[in-house]
Image (cartoon, helix red, strand yellow):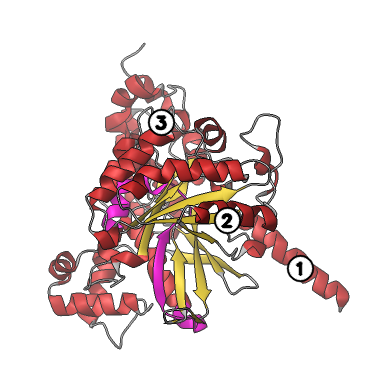
Amino acid sequence: MSRVPFLTIALSASTMATVLPAAAALHSTRTAFFFAQPLFELKALLPNLRTRHQTCNFSPSLSLRRFSSLRQRNLSPMAMSDAAPTAEATGTPLPSQNILQRGPTVVSERKETPFQRFDTLSTALGGSGKAKMVWKSLREGKDPWTNEEEVTPHARQTLLTNFEPLPLVSMGSKASCGTTKMLVRLADGLEVEAVVIPHEGRPTAQSVVEPRTTLCVSSQVGCNRGCAFCATGKMGFVRNLSVHEILSQVFLAHRCIKEKGLPPLHNVVFMGMGEPLNNVHSVAEAVRILTDDNCFRISPSKVTVSSVGPSPELIRATADVRAMLAWSVHAADDSLRKQLVPTTKHSMTLLRDTYLDVLKARTRGMSVFMVAVTLINGVNDSEEHAEQLVQLMQPLRDAGIKLCVDLIPYNDIGAAGTFGLAGGVQFTRTQPDRVNAFQKVVRSYGLTCFVRVTRGDDEGAACGQLVTTAGKLRRKRQAAQGGEAAQE
């Protein structure tokens, strides 16, 4: 193998040295953008090519045309040739994600995010007063870049010059129940979904629950857990979200609430696209800022991080996460669990015991543990399955951990519902009588057990339905508009 296989990419090093400065000079003009951009990124790749060729099976015959093609699809050419990581992801971006993560922007040092801890933002903006202005604006759903009434010109100019802009909502849809799904476009052109769920006030035996809003946030583009009943799992894993991208969803929710006159944001749940523990570093920092009194001011008891529990190591990493924990169990039996969550590598008892260790080290108020089960008709919804779940949870009960079992009727995701089980079983929603029977068994052992009310399923915004299919939503709307026009 030649020591310089990557010089066959189409441009020699000497040609690059000649062309790149000229392209750079033109880069600021709109006409040269699409020409200069791939060259800048190719230059950024060159110092790493020989090393990566030895470890990533990178094709030496990659042409510049092929590079540009991948670039237009917001993909790193290395990501196209890298094998899936063999170790559990821990939130540290893979080598192929470090280079082209920002997509259409120039590859350079990442700008700062306004979603920083208060003291850090104060330093970056030149004073705590400016940081207070910016955080007040973010909490109120007002863009601090353009909020002339509450943010000083100096702070706005600093934001414009040194800080990453906020992602935009490229599309939104509202379900009949009032649930709003936001399609959030990131800087590199990729998209994630966040769901704003308003709740009406209701009386309880102890008090009256005030109207409130819950936000379901995404932590990754796609997901590598491969849950057989989940549309996001069908997507596969694309990349982790940064703290900036996670918390931008919270800002956009505040803005949505403000514009639509919804109840105030009360709960934030990491139950959107992605496996939070496979991006645990960014999720932990996002939670810290969410719950900071100087930042988003959400109570730690109102933030929930939900996970399938990829590994004992990643479960232990939640020890310092200032949020409630939820475990997506789906089946207590190891064999059935492996079919529903094909990436399961550890026994349910080992994962349970690891969660128990983490929960025992927490304060009583933060040790409440939610256990979620997506009920699929004839698959995991029998009374025997309920008994198995109760037995799996028994050691946590013996340790005094307060448990809450959350039963989630399966939400249709189409053909993907057959994925994962032998014989091609078509997934359908469990019938209400079977849900009630399952709940009755769990409650008979003294456990708190609720059936989650399905929200947003008519707009693909319910649990398990999140997937970035903007084209599908557009076609649905166009078909509806066409039908209305035909009726007229």
What residue appears at the point 67 percent right and 56 percent down from the top-left corner?
Answer: 472
- Could you tell me the amino acid type at mark 3? His
Q: Is residue 28 visible?
A: no
Q: Which mark is residue 440?
A: 2
What residue sits 47% from the left and 45% below the top?
A: 390
| Amino acid on which the number 1 mark rests in the picture | Ala
Q: CA distance from mark 3 to mark 1?
A: 46 Å
Q: Tell me if mark 3 has few (under 14), some (14-19) or many (20+) residues whose alpha carbon lies within 10 angstroms of its own.
A: some
Classify mark 2: residues with Cα within 10 Å, few (<14), some (14-19) or many (20+).
some
Residue ID for mark 3:
346
Determine which of the numbered discs, if any, sits on residue 198 in the image. Answer: none
437 lies above or below 115: above
Question: For this rendering, which residue is in front, 487 or 88?
Answer: 88
Q: Quadrant of the C terminus?
A: bottom right
Mark closer to the chain start, 1 or 2? 2
Task: Answer with left or right where residue 477 lies relative to residue 75.
Answer: right
Disc number for residue 480: 1
Q: Is residue 283 inside the magenta stretch? A: yes
- Which residue type carries mark 2? Lys
Mark 2: secondary structure:
helix
Quadrant housing the N terminus: top left
Please report the bounds of the magenta region as a residue range.
257-286
